[in-house]
Amino acid sequence: MSNNAIKATGLNKKYGDFEIKNLSLSLPSGCIMGLIGENGAGKSTLIRLLMNACDRDSGTVSLLDDENVGYSEDDVRQDIGIVIDPACLPQNYNPVTLGKIMSGFYKKWDNDEYNKYLDLFEIDRKKKIFNLSTGTKMKLMIATALSHDAKLLILDEPTNGLDPMVREQFLDILGDFTLDAGHSVLISSHIISDLEKICDYVAYMHKGELKFCDEKDKLLDDYRVVKCSEAQLDDLPKSSCIGAKKGQFGCEVLLKSDDVPLGFTKERTTLEEIILFMARDGKERE
Amino acid sequence: MNGCLNKSLTEMKSVGKVFIAFVLILGIIGVFAQNDMIFSFYITFIAISSASQVLEGNGTSWQTYEYMLPTSCEQSVSAVYIVSVIYNGIFFLGTLITHIAGGLICKAADGALDLPKPEDVTIMDGEFIKLLLFFSFFSLFMSGLSCAYFYRYRHISNRKVYIGAGIILLVSVAVSGIIIGSEIVTLSWGIVIHTIIISLIVFPLSEKFSEFFYDKYRG
């Protein structure tokens, strides 16, 4: 079994004004990592770089302990399930034809498994893909990612367009998938509450930079939201305030747990709050 | 069959029907009308159809997905080229069928229904076959060179790909300019030699050969 499902070191990529800067992250095997970031933060670019679907300027990538990603039909991508924008699917085919095509790519393609997911997601086998709704297209892409005995799933906003019931179902599938210690998932999403439910690790990107990549539980332990008045906020050392929100009835401040002064009530925070405070603070600094 | 070729051929099954119908109808009309303009259009069509194959294979969102699927550069570009060659084949066959059929109908009609008399049936004063071969060559040359180029630079930025495509176009026009003055035999050999060269560059004819290019071009 591989130690790291994903290991990226010193990744750099420049696209016009946009730049991925010296990005390093690793995802241990058997874990789920949530990739969070605003639109245009570089999540999809990072996924393309990981899959070697575009050249990197510098840095190294290893998936399932293999650095030769994307050089032959027998490479490590055989063990990776991928979900990206479903607009990439060939739109003139129906799901059955798509299954036949995918079987030509994946040596371990399991048509029974594929059909099982088509049934589970209630996907019409005869409809052409362009006639399917956005959510159904996404379900189809998820079905293809799960039908070839993948050890690693790389999912770029897979819950886009899914209704809450299917989203819940999908999160359960991911939970079941990682019951096998050799299975890992990298999932990017804007629905942070979903990620909080399933992720072991969280990575946050902002404008091409990885702001943090840590264990979810550690993050939740490390940060606290403190409610205070504006006067109290002014008294807090600026260096310890990670983010603040001023409201009609006082202020909320995100602090490192250890930096919360005596006398303040420490409230356990959510991942969504941490990200929102950080994102807001990032915008104010710009 | 590898996934790329499977996908391209499946695509061709649906688009190909329209293509074949178009070739047959235009070909028959061309013979009956004995109009040089129609023939010129008919021939130009082949160049466009092959170019569209290369664009379809390299410029759509499918490409983004394909790069993440387990496939090699050789597989993805050879699939595009094979389809391009098949389209050329269909075009040749369609031309042959329509012109024989058109000729036979004109002969049978023997001047009735305002159809040209058998002795009047000529195609661009005998220049048609030459032009047909020229455009086939032009089309295969462009798509072949594009495939070879994408094979090497498929991960490079769009700007470089467009510059490359521009260079390919200029080279194609220049080479075609030289070739258009050639005889039919020369054009035919040009097509054969070109196909062999592109095959050698693009297709993994043997594992060893493929590995050689794989090692040479990786990264």
Image: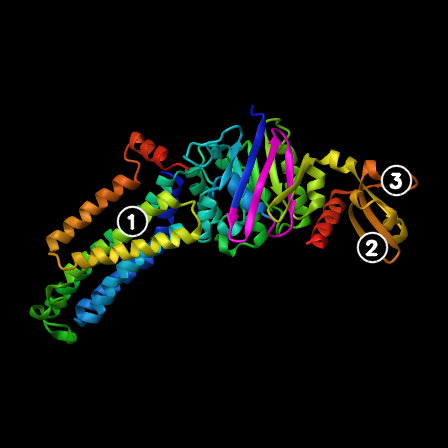
Disc 3 to disc 1, how far (Cα)? Answer: 69 Å
Q: Residue at x 21, y 57 (%)?
A: B176
- Circle 2 SS class: strand
Mark 1 — residue? Answer: B145
The picture places residue B119, in percent across and down from the top left corner, at 6, 69
**Corner quadrant of residue B72:** top left
Point out the tag, 3 or 2, that comes first from the N-terminus.
2
The picture places residue A115, in percent across and down from the top left corner, at 52, 40
Q: In this view of the protein, can residue A207 be seen by the observer?
A: yes
Disc 1 to disc 2, how far (Cα)? Answer: 62 Å
Is-magenta flag for residue A40?
yes
Residue A246 is tagged as 2
The picture places residue A17, in percent across and down from the top left corner, at 54, 53
The region drawn magenta spans A14-41
Give the residue type that dot 1 points to: Leu
Q: Give the quarter of the figure containing the N terminus of chain B.
A: top left
Give the residue type that dot 2 points to: Lys
Q: In this view of the protein, can residue B59 be seen by the observer?
A: no
* Mark 3 crowdedness (10 Å alpha carbons): few <14, some 14-19, many ≥20: few
Disc 3 to disc 2, how far (Cα)? Answer: 19 Å
